[in-house]
């Protein structure tokens, strides 16, 4: 059956007549600032008696005429004046949402976001809110103005007011008078002081966070994630649109053409050949190459592509004294398989085709539950390791799960990972409570063990699989980021370089402020690669749009190396909640488009679907997941970079292939490892006490 792709876009009409807006140099009541970046030639000419070129902003009352204001017919073909028209529409939408009584704020990409409470009460401690966002754009998918409606997830607002909370340091963001406010905002202006003084604490309600939950002894519930995000997402945005947007009141603001989300134009849809996602595993006993599309299936009967580079693998454990008996059971299951029919996991050695044994002399038992590091460190100093012939892996049995609100408890594993990394030993965390629960269900337990075995094999230096089809000689460099929400700080990890077959080479790590070092590390990777092989092109996968000052030193460095090859920069973003998606109405209600589908949503901007729904697959298990697409913007500093009509497909294919090389779990990822792996390092490295050892920069210890 042919696909039928829809997207979360509503189209609406251009205005019947050219709108007239009114501008002043000075701020008036009910006026809105217009930034200097929106000063068109017409606007500058209209202020003929006043030089506005030195002003940061002027003001508009939009369609409301005021004394001494200058009226101008807005030219909707001028991108600067069109952006003012967009500002007007956003103002209109915000007013509409205020009138509906919604909580109104902005999401992290500065789009209008509204919060609606779940009608059914689910907790005595908080109210659950659904969040929806509006994004305006003009003639990107069609020749009309377009309104994107996205579902931005949920938030919990506590029913306990700020006034009734003892320690205010744990209060972060709050809801007050249908607005989201930052309780901890800096009171560095008279306006902020005035706003803070007017807050009624008895009517101000904090948004849920782990520290506050711990203080109030709130019950921490497991997040009940839907099996199919597409179904939940589309159901919610359609319900929201039908109830609030397909109304006469909203149509007076946004004259929607049709009361349904639009189909994706057929000329915007294309597909990557499924076969380019083929993966190569270990050869059979006759020396024949073995390939497969789906690692989760392949690993049940194929062997990994390469073993670790040492024949001897030793495993030992680190645990609290009360968990010693659990270690015995877990080790037996991990090494020999679970006690069921062993259909999917027959033990570590057989699953990843290696030899391994227990290193009982390195077993570490600690007694202090909350501060185990001194004991562990002291015992580690007494041990001898033979790194010349043996690879070591330590399992840390964590008494605390990842949802624990205590920051110190969360940091224990990071500290242990760093401690052992300095010794050249990789670590694997095991959540004690989760694994105890899993052991009781032997069937599902084997899937957890599969993922652990896979990740450990890669950490030890093995290569579970690689790309089977690699036509080009090119260097791919990935730069990812991780934002620590509790610190509101962003970290980046950079110069993750990969060969064209998808095999990892090495990485460097930097903080966000070290942009010069970042550029230097990228140049080092380019120089090292091109000294060995002639590259067809250099491709950088970046977690955000790359600024010119970030690109410039790379261009200059390539010129000094006399590299006359094109440089391409791909900005790769998840689309989980904040932007455009698409869904297939012709797939039994499951909605996810075929793997390899890509949609051109603007000039050199695409949606790419990475999943394991292939054209000839008759069955699809919920266990495979339903990943959303990623959004990719492609640019190049080279003027003739896009003369080859096939280059865009090549670059999208590369992203598609690199999303199939994730070795932390068997589930297909929607984001390529060029972004995923740096993000994982950026999550861990800032919490280390020291720097990442040099010997660890060509290893996947962070999986």
Image (cartoon, grey):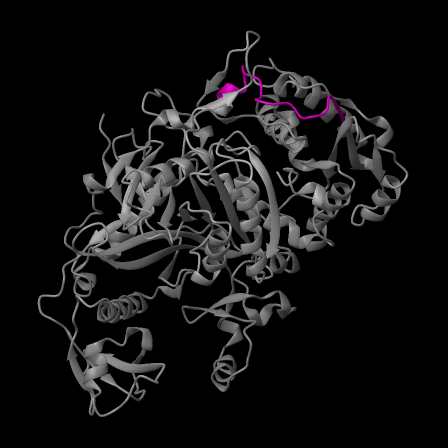
Q: Is residue 194 above or below residue 132?
A: below
Q: In the rendering, at what x and y percent does residue 459 appear? A: 65, 33
Question: Which residue is the extreme one toward the left?
Answer: 16
Going by the image, does 83 lie left or right of 703? left
Find out whether residue 308 is within the magenta segment: yes
Please say whether residue 209 is visible from this viewpoint: yes
Q: Residue sitting at 50 percent across and 15 percent down? A: 289
Please identify the quadrant where the N terminus is shown: top left
Find out whether residue 298 is within the magenta segment: yes
Q: In this view, does 466 lie above or below 555?
A: above
**Residue 117 or residue 169, whichever sits in front:** 169
Q: Is residue 481 above or below residue 547?
A: above
Going by the image, does 453 lie left or right of 262? right
Q: Residue sitting at 45 percent across and 29 percent down? A: 624
Question: Magenta segment, which residues?
Answer: 297-314
Q: In the rendering, at what x and y percent does residue 200 appear? A: 50, 77
Please say whether residue 483 is visible from this viewpoint: no
Total marks placed: 0
Q: In which quarter of the image is residue 187?
A: bottom right
Q: Residue sitting at 51 percent across and 84 percent down? A: 189
**Residue 137 or residue 114, whichever sits in front:** 137
**Residue 217 or residue 58, whichever sits in front:** 58
């Amino acid at each position: 059956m042919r696909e039928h792709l829809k997207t979360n876009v509503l189209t609406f009409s251009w205005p019947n007549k050219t709108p007239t807006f009114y501008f002043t140099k000075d701020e008036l009541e009910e006026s809105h600032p217009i930034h200097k970046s929106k000063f068109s030639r017409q606007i500058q000419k209209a202020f003929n008696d006043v030089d506005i070129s030195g002003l940061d902003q002027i003001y508009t009352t939009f369609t409301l005429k005021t004394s001494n204001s200058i009226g101008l017919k807005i030219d909707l073909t001028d991108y600067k004046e069109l952006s003012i028209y967009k500002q007007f529409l956003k103002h209109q939408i915000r007013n509409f949402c205020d009138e509906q009584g919604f909580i109104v704020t902005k999401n992290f990409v500065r789009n209008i976001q509204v919060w609606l409470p779940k009608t059914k009460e689910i907790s005595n401690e908080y109210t659950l809110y659904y969040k929806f966002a509006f994004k305006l754009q003009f003639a990107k998918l069609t020749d009309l103005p377009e309104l994107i409606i996205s579902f931005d997830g949920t938030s919990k607002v506590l029913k306990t007011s700020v006034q009734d909370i003892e320690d205010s340091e744990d209060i972060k963001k709050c809801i007050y008078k249908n607005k989201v406010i930052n309780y901890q905002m800096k009171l560095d202006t008279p306006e902020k002081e005035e706003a803070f003084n007017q807050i009624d604490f008895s009517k101000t309600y904090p948004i849920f966070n782990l520290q506050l939950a711990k203080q109030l002894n709130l019950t921490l519930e497991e997040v009940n994630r839907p099996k199919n995000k597409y179904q939940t997402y589309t159901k919610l945005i359609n319900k929201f649109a039908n109830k609030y947007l397909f109304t006469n009141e909203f149509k007076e603001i946004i004259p929607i053409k049709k009361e349904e989300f639009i189909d994706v134009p057929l000329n915007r849809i294309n597909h990557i050949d499924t076969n380019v996602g083929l993966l190569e595993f270990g050869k059979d006993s006759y020396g024949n190459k073995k390939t497969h599309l789906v690692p989760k299936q392949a690993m049940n009967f194929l062997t990994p592509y390469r073993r670790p580079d040492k024949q001897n693998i030793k495993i030992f454990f680190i645990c609290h004294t009360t968990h010693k008996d659990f270690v015995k059971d877990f080790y037996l299951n991990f090494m020999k398989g679970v006690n069921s029919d062993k259909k999917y996991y027959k033990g570590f050695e057989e699953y990843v085709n290696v030899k391994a044994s227990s290193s009982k002399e390195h077993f570490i038992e600690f007694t202090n539950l909350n501060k185990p590091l001194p004991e562990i460190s002291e015992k580690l100093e007494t041990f001898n390791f033979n790194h010349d012939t043996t690879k070591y892996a330590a399992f840390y049995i964590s008494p605390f799960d990842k949802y624990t609100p205590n920051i110190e408890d969360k940091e224990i594993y990071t500290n242990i990972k760093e401690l052992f990394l300095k010794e050249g030993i990789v670590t694997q965390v095991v959540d004690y409570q989760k694994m105890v629960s899993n052991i009781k269900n032997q069937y599902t337990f084997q899937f957890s063990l599969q993922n652990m075995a896979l990740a450990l094999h890669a950490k030890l230096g093995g290569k579970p699989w690689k790309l089977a089809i690699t036509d080009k000689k090119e260097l791919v460099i990935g730069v990812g980021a991780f934002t620590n929400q509790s610190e509101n700080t962003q970290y980046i990890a950079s110069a993750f370089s990969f060969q064209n077959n998808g095999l990892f080479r090495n990485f460097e790590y930097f903080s966000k402020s070290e942009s010069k070092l970042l550029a230097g590390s990228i140049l080092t990777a380019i120089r090292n690669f091109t000294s060995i092989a002639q590259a067809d092109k250099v491709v950088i996968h970046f977690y955000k749009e790359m600024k010119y000052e970030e690109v410039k030193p790379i261009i200059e460095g390539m010129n000094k190396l006399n590299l006359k090859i094109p440089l391409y920069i791909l900005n790769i973003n998840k689309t989980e909640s904040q932007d455009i998606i698409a869904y297939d109405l012709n797939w039994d209600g499951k909605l996810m488009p075929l793997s390899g589908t890509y949609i051109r949503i603007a000039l050199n901007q695409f949606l790419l679907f990475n999943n394991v729904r292939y054209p000839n697959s008759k069955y699809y298990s919920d266990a495979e997941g339903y990943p959303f697409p990623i959004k990719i913007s492609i640019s190049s500093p080279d003027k003739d970079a896009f003369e080859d009509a096939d280059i865009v497909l090549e670059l999208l294919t590369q992203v598609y292939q690199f999303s199939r090389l994730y070795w932390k779990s068997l589930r297909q990822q929607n984001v390529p490892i060029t972004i995923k792996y740096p993000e994982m390092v950026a999550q861990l490295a800032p919490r280390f006490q020291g720097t990442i050892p040099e010997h660890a920069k060509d290893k996947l210890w962070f999986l």
